[in-house]
Image: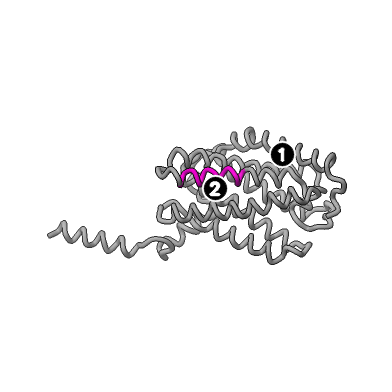
Amino acid sequence: LDKGRKLLINARATNASGVGFHLGRAPRYLLTGCWGECIAQQSEPLYAQGTLLVIAEYALFVLLSIGTGFRPPANISICGYMETLPNWVAFLYCHVAASGIDSTLWHAVVVVKKEPNLPLAAVQMVLSVLCAITLTGFSIFPRCLWTRHQTCVLWWVYITSAAMAVMFLRDCRKPNYTVVPALVWALGTWLCNVFYYESSLRFYTAEAISIVAYIMWCSSIQRQHERKYTLFNVLIVDGALAMAMLTAFRYHQGEVCKVTGKW
């Protein structure tokens, strides 16, 4: 009889907890959704906090680009600023983009190893690789190469949205999954559409929200799969990639573009 009562109590508790956004889980969804990887590693030494550096770098890039005395471009947007900012500021953006490429490709490898459903693993791997390729594309093709740049931007948005949707369908019932990055991503991309034809800080802010959402998404993936994303990864591996990306960006800007910094 006691055993039966325990089973009944456990069943009721399971039904009460449910799946998704139960009120008792709201704090966990909020915290893990924002920077759950950093929270999970708060007892780790500083060198283990690679994502914290990425967050700080992007905040510094935004502050320097719009909050200091640099000449604003004709088009107030992140890609517009990239054509006019000095290399030491532009590198911050490239470094953040490189960390996103690193994290996305890492996920492509991990999902092949861990996903038991082969077709689903293949879909996720392809989406992750394409996310990385398109992110690389619009980071090395400046706005003055409009067709290449904008094609990569649009496909990055489409593919990332698809990847987030697939991940939601696969992982929404798992305890370490959070939908918060996808919601922030939806907000950012929607605002980009609303303010697309403006050259204003509102559009810049919309772009920034989308990039922050991508960082959050990468962070949540790394937490879910327990990746140790250390400062070594960020400074050495991603740093080398960022230097290569910035070099390619300046080459295209200086040698391929007919007009630059006037968009």
Magenta segment range? 120-132
Q: Nearer the viewer, residue 109 or 117?
A: 117
Question: Which residue is denoted by mark 1 in the rendering?
Answer: 245
Q: Amino acid at mark 2?
A: Ser
Numbered circles on residues, count: 2
Q: Position of residue 46 (x, y in %)?
A: 56, 39
Which residue type does callout 1 highlight?
Met
Closest to the observer, 188 or 24 = 188
Mark 1 near mark 2, Cβ–Cβ under 8 Å?
A: no
Label 2, secondary structure: give it. helix
Residue under the image location 72 percent in, 61 percent down? 203
**Residue 248: x, y in percent?**
75, 38
Name the residue carrying label 2. 219
Quarter residue 88 falls in: top right
Check the picture and name the quadrant holding the N terminus.
bottom left
Horizontal and vertical percent for residue 75? 80, 57
Which residue, as the protein is rendered here, is positioned at the far left?
1
Residue drawn at x 85%, y 48% is: 260
Mark 1–mark 2 distance (CA, rounded to whole Å): 22 Å
